[in-house]
Image: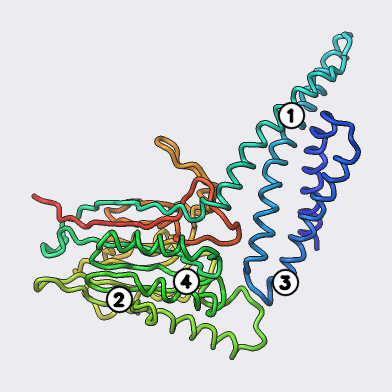
Amino acid sequence: MLRLFIFTSVILLIDFYAFQSVRTLTKNKWIYLVYWLISIGVIANLFFQFSQRDTHGISQRVMFAIGLFILLGVPKIVMAFSMLAEDIIRIIKSVFNLMSSSDATFIPSRRAFVSKVALGLAAIPFASTIYGMMRGKYNYQVVKHTLFFNDLPEAFDGFKITHLSDIHSGSFDNPEKISYGIDLINEQESDVVLFTGDLVNNIADEMDNWIPYFNRIQAKEGKYSVLGNHDYGEYVRWNNSEEKEQNFQAIKDIHPKIGFDLLLNESRYLKKNGEKIALVGVENWGTRFKKAGDLKKASENIKKEDFKILMSHDPSHWESEVKKHEDNYHLTLSGHTHGMQFGIEIPGIKWSPVQYIYKHWAGIYKEYNRYINVNRGFGFLAFPGRVGIWPEISVITLKKMKD
């Protein structure tokens, strides 16, 4: 209740300041009424949909409520800070003028100018959010990397991996776009396709309509997968433990239906021309989420000297355990962060709020001569869109470093 009170108070304070820019530009009381009716309606809808979340999970109705709240909320934050900044400057000038015995005058035209600037600035995140919700969430990007290793078996020089993560099928609403994404995956003609978890938002039947699409994914040497934190059904209030377990089993059963070999703290050898590399898959392991992953168990049937690719949903696993492990896991594949589905990635700038939570949040990182690729996610969750951080199909080519 305290958190709810604080959240509501902050939102209303932002709304109040944003409203000042509207009130400065018009005296029409009908516009005032519409402003507050929309504001209160959006907040009330958000609270109502979240009250249903325990039984329905993160449904499309919940995501729409979040999207609408962000669509209107972020521009209001821009407006509010613009008006607040003008108030602070005016107060400082008033105090200075009072102390210097000068006249402090309020200039309505300046207030109106600031209001116009605030509305103009607010239009930028408003338009960006609309684009992100309508088109950005399916703006698939093929991101290619070439990684070099001294000890890569010769037969795997040029071996190509397509890395997918965070499908979140319960969020999909456009079969044509999903089909386009699957076609992009197949166009890469990779040797293997590796999926690092979060097949659904919460419930197994979210995937029912999408099985024929993902079953079309092709790979020369096989398709392999692991689980993510959303695959355990822990964000829904179940009637009993048996119902939860049935859902979990149903989610695991989906993987073979779409042609993926699900690794549950297990390993496989990928073989080529008499040589092999080890593929290790752990269940979800995260510093903030479920710790079902067991790296020791997953690696018990492989050798220390093997070239290893590890599939682990949460990149915090790499930071906490993998990158300094006594055994060399040459390449780790993760997802989970989605890049927060919001940020800026242009030449010279790579930023997202999620970087303040996860050290490794998008793309390739190298430490201790080991690599991790954090996939930005194929799908989306909570916010029904993407702004600046687009859905990703990673393509990684392994190369043997020549002497």
Instruction: Kindly report the distance in space between the C-alpha atoms of the residues bearing marks 2 and 4.
Output: 24 Å
**68 left or right of 321 in image:** right
Query: Which residue sits at x=69%, y=59%?
Result: 65
Q: Amino acid at mark 2?
A: Ser
Please state the horizontal and vertical placement of residue 375, each as a whole percent of the image: 41, 57
Q: Residues within 10 Å of mark 1 (few under 14, many from 20)?
A: few
Q: Amino acid at mark 4?
A: Leu
Q: CA distance from mark 4 to mark 1?
A: 45 Å
Q: Secondary structure at mark 3?
A: loop
Secondary structure beneath dot 4 equals: loop
Q: Residue furthest front?
A: 176
Labels 2 & 3 near each other (Cβ < 8 A): no
Judged by depth in the image, the label closer to the viewer, 2 or 3, is 3
Q: Residues within 10 Å of mark 3 (few under 14, many from 20)?
A: some
Could you tell whether 16 is left or right of 173 in the image? right
Query: Residue tagged by mark 2?
Result: 299
Q: Dot 1: what SS?
A: helix
Nearer the observer: mark 2 or 4; the answer is 4
The amino acid type, in three-letter code, at marker 3 is Gln
Image height of 51 relative to 251, above or below: above
Which sits earlier in the primary sequence, circle 4 or circle 1?
Answer: 1
Residue on which the image places disc 1: 85
Three-letter code for the amino acid on which mark 1 is drawn:
Ala
Label 4 belongs to which residue? 199
